[in-house]
Image: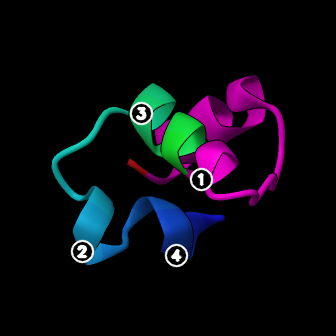
Amino acid sequence: MLSVLRAPEHCDLAVAQVWARELDEGRYYCLISSMYRISRATG
């Protein structure tokens, strides 16, 4: 999940935008709240 959030194509996007784009591409990793939690925990 962290590699998805830190990918170059996502560097300027909010967590919600990353989650939505990945979902649009057919990739579901976790709940959006989990994605926020991971993002907060890693800075």
Crowdedness of circle 3 by 10 Å Cα count: few (<14), some, many (20+)? few
Give the left or right position of residue 18, taking residue 9 as reference: right
Residue 32: where, in percent of width, then height? 70, 29
Asked if residue 39 is positioned above or below residue 25 in the image, the reply reads: above
Three-letter amino acid code at the position of disc 2: Pro
Q: Determine the CA span between mark 3 and mark 2.
A: 14 Å
The answer to whether marks 4 and 1 mark residues whose Cβ atoms lie closer than 8 Å is no
Q: Where are the magenta residues, as a range?
A: 22-42
| Residue located 81% across and 55% down the image | 29
- Label 1, on which residue? 22
- Label 3, on which residue? 17
Which mark's residue is nearer the viewer, 4 or 1? 1
- Which of the marked residues, 4 or 1, is nearer the chain's N terminus? 4
**Element type at mark 3:** helix
| Residue located 48% across and 54% down the image | 42
Three-letter amino acid code at the position of disc 3: Gln
The answer to whether marks 3 and 4 mark residues whose Cβ atoms lie closer than 8 Å is no
Which mark's residue is nearer the viewer, 2 or 4? 2
Give the left or right position of residue 10, taking residue 32 as reference: left
Q: Determine the CA span between mark 3 and mark 4.
A: 15 Å
Residue 31: where, in percent of width, then height? 82, 33
